[in-house]
Image (spheres, coloured by chain):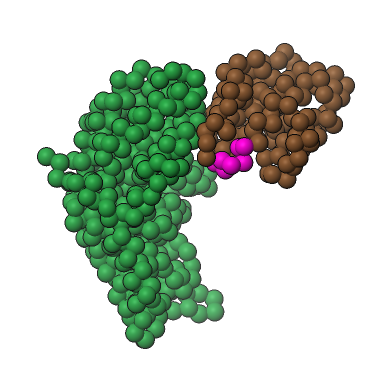
Amino acid sequence: MDKLNPVELKKDFPILKESINGNKLVYLDNGATTQKPIQVIEAINNYNKLSHGNPHRGAHKLSVLATTEYNLAKESVKNFINANNIEEIIFTKNTTESLNLIALSYGMEFVDENDEIVLAISEHHSNILPWQRVAKEKGAILKYMYLDKNGRITLEEIKNKITNKTKIVSIAQMSNVLGTVHPIEEIIDYAHKMGSIVIVDGAQSTPHMKIDVQNLNVDFFVFSAHKMLGPMGMGVLYGKKELLENMPPFLMGGDMIEYVYEQNATFASLPFKFEAGTQNVEGAVGLRSAIDYLKNIGLDNIEYHEKLLTEYALDKLLTLDYINIQGPKDLEKRGGIISFTIDNIHPHDVASILDSYGVAIRAGHHCAQPLMRYLNVPATSRASFYFYNTKEDVDQLIAGIKNVRKWLGYGS
Amino acid sequence: MDLNMIYTQLIMEHNKSGHNKKSLENPDISEKGHNPSCGDDITLEIKLNGDLIENASFVGVGCAISQASTSMMIDLIKGKTIEEAMELVETFIGMIKKEITNEKDLEKLEDAMVLQNISNMPARVKCAVLAWHTLKEALSSL
């Protein structure tokens, strides 16, 4: 049973009450960023009003308060993804920075010539470019797992691409374009057998489903706050302690040191070794508040509500013969992201015209050009849901699509 | 923003007609233009006769606005000299940037004048100027 009441929850989100171009806002671009509830906005406000100081530095009250807030956020993230130890949680700017940190620190240190790095063809550019850099620098080989017709990676493909030459497998848990939930349990299991570590990009999955990094036995797990009700400029890197300990620092500077001499330095222990310079404390406060909000309504409930919404949307879209769904058309192992194309109409026209009806979606290549090429489409339109979306929002999308066709002279 | 201002009859006609969408035989210039964030991707082909643009066409994919803008530009530059074409590019870009607003100055853009309103739709400006930037690039490299 759907235990969520999206109409009630929507009331917590001031921006969702706004109208766009004279229409009620229907926000379906949650894969790009989610909106913030008043609780998160106020938590950040209160921090700035009452507790702002530079953490870890001063003995004065405000510095201590800021340090406490920062540490509470770390604790909250640790519990949220069930990490073993708070030292395994590193705060970054976003998922992209987390992935770059792993590539430049772990990758450059432990990947050798002719080693193999395996990605999925559906990866976001942020999980491709850092590995191209490592591969070029170290003479390693970049390989891709391809998708079947339904947008999924088969067990056979996993076994084809991951071999005993593989040093790193890096894959998004949920594709930001297709909504496919990849079989990361099987991938982690098999990669470990082959002696490879696995990095999971949880940017699209963490906001929508329960994550347990210990249960997954994943080596690194990364995500961003702004796709789960939190602020931008706030990202998370989880890494197994024994891996993080052996990695060289990423950025150099204040707060990540132990002793600094004229010609050399020793580094702070985890997690500070990877957190150079003043950190985004208000971002951390916002993330903690977002986690509280999500826990309060329940990740399982969110996942279930979005499943119903995705089913409803897919049913409606599949009845329109000019719509082509890219990715899984069934509900098995997929999340609330639906990419589609409309015959003879470019996605940018779709997004612009929908916008004039108040419906916000994303159009373009979604930072996944290799996937677009693989699917043989120049771009797609993408609707992505969150728990505050309703069936009425989906109805607005469908009505909007019919209007798009009308504007471009294709009847309705 | 009123969609009527952008998705005009004229833009729709150019988008659908495709009369300038083909490959030329042995073009003197073949210039690729690309909007990385949208997936608009066109190749402009030009046949020269001295400094006269004897024929022009394009191939590629893109939204209605970029396709129509490209087609309008090709209609406009056929039979013009390189210098005249460059001047038209500057006028078009000036119009989009709202630097040239005088109707009399804009008249020489003919059909492409209807794209004036695109400046009210910031997200789509780059679709409208793609072909023109591509032409400028092509002609200034001669």
| Left or right: A399 as drawn, with respect to B7 | left
Give the drawing colour for chain A. green
Q: Is residue A265 magenta?
A: no
Q: Main secondary structure of the magenta part?
A: helix
| Left or right: A5 as drawn, with respect to A283 | left
Percent of width and height locating residue A263: 54, 76
Span highlighted in magenta in the image: B117-123
**A119, A77: nearer the viewer:** A77
Would residue A209 be seen by someone viewing this image from the given angle? no
Quarter assignment of residue A148? top left
Residue found at x 24% / y 63%? A76
| Left or right: B136 as drawn, with respect to A260 | right
Residue found at x 48% / y 71%? A253
Residue farthest toward the bottom in the current orientation of the protein: A60
Q: Is residue B122 magenta?
A: yes
Q: Examine the rendered structure and indicate whether residue A193 appears above or below residue A288.
A: above
**A50, A173: nearer the viewer:** A50
Q: Examine the rendered structure and indicate whether residue A336 appears above or below residue A148.
A: below
Residue found at x 46% / y 74%? A254
**A54, A51: nearer the viewer:** A51
Quadrant of image for the N terminus of chain A: top left
Give the drawing colour for chain B. brown
Residue farthest toward the right in the current orientation of the protein: B50
Quadrant of image for the C terminus of chain A: top left
